[in-house]
Amino acid sequence: MELYIEQIFFALVFTIIISIVVVTIHVKGDKKGQRRPPQPAGALPLIGHLHLLGANQLLHRTFGDMADKYGPVFSIRLGSHQALLVSDSKVAKECFTTNDKVLCTRPKSLALELMGYNNKIFGFGPYGQYWRDMRKLVTVELLSSRRLELLKHVRDTEINCFIKELYEQTVKNRGVAVVEMKERISNLAMNIIVRMIAGKAYFGPQGSCDEESRRCQKAMGDFMYMVGLILVSDTVPLLGWVDVLMGRISKMKRTAKDLDVVLGSWVNEHRDRKLGQGLNGDQDFIDVMLSVMDEGNVPTQEANTIIKANCLLHRDPSIWQNPLHFLPERFLTDHANVDVRGKHFELIPFSSGRRTCPGVSLTLQVAHLALARLLHAFELGTVSDTAIDMSESPGLSLPRATPLEVTLTPRLPSTLYG
Ligand code: HEM
């Protein structure tokens, strides 16, 4: 026990020293305002993940100060990795167009080795033949306009159920209901995606779900959280034992097993369903995916270059007035024509270039429809008219730190709620 405590103490002290010494910042932008062309910068898994430590605001301020001092493009060294930071939309454009091929690979990480079938999740993987094949498969078979049109009923029925459940909640409360929306919206997104991929609905009325759904939800949640963590092993491989001591490795292995069980059951159920229906002609998404995997088509190219370059762009005060304030009306006035699909480099929430998000059309369709239905069906308010806490918590998609409680009052005749 004593030894164990000593080890933890040693690990903590060592980690603090390492973060001071090894995360030495090598500024390469040299002079203020000097613009340099983006350069391949070793391997950089970290900048995109730093904000996931829960210090997002602080990091943006720090990087913002550094950008003021060193100009719109500079690099920092984080242990064995180098990161390029870009805060200017013109430089970002250069990164995602002229230099896109050089910058579009992704580094390996321990989290993805343990939880992503040895770095085979294509969205996080190195650029190469395997990534090209998987990207084509996803854009053509799952997220193409044709497929989205074919699967339109999935979004429609899920959003109908979402609105109906909210309405039932207001009926139960005789008029106005206080509802926690964060989990409901996350369940809605999960249901739509899982139904599109595996043909299953996970969450029933009021978020009820069976054992398998619960396991899937937990495994996905743990994955999203842990894949966003910064591991000592990725920065200073020699100190990998720190992650072991902190219990991260065993937790990742457990999550990998849980994910395996869930995905395995999707594939088996899908095969059984097809056999039961005597289908063998028209291939659907899981069939095509399995055939690509069966060909032994695995990544061959090692990742050695990666740039994450946009964490300051969306807060550039020379483009966005009051960049830290939530002012949606700016998209109806000064920025009315901004396009979020990766063509206007001052706003690239879905990234741009080769690795741009293939889910952008689905996301915009679902978000627009769900929001329009919600606003049409209810008057929305906050509990005791307090401002909403917008703090972020660790995780791949920077989830809200606190629940999102809103008041809902129906505004339509009851017959219109399905
Ligand atoms: C608000 C919603 C979303 C946002 C803001 C978003 C944002 C992004 C961003 C910034 C990237 C680039 C990551 C990188 O540079 O490494 C990305 C990649 C990706 N996204 Fe999304 N995304 C969203 C929803 C979706 C949805 C609904 C799907 C699929 C159903 C999806 C599938 C993917 C995939 C597969 C990649 C990896 C692409 C590749 O590596 O080639 N995303 N997303």
Image (cartoon, grey):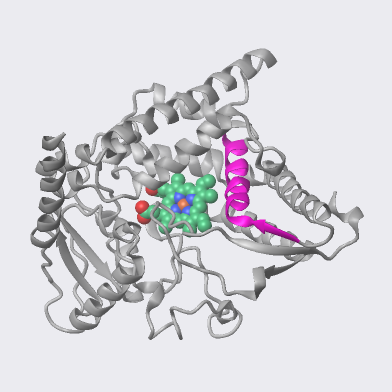
Q: Residue furthest front?
A: 2
Q: Quadrant of residue 365?
A: bottom right
Left or right of 147, for residue 125: left
Nearest the viewer among 376 and 151 is 376
Give percent across and percent down for residue 119.
30, 36
Q: Quadrant of residue 279?
A: top right
Q: Quadrant of residue 314?
A: bottom left
Give percent across and percent down for residue 263.
48, 28
Q: Is residue 182 magenta?
A: yes
Nearest the viewer among 317 and 340 is 317
> Which region shows up in magenta?
177-197
Work out whether residue 354 can be spotted: no
Q: Main secondary structure of the magenta part?
A: helix
Q: Look at the picture and state if 405 lies above or below 202.
A: below
Left or right of 290, for residue 164: right
Residue found 75% across the figure and 46% down from its top: 161
Left or right of 8, for residue 47: right
Q: Is residue 319 magenta?
A: no
Left or right of 324, for residue 155: right
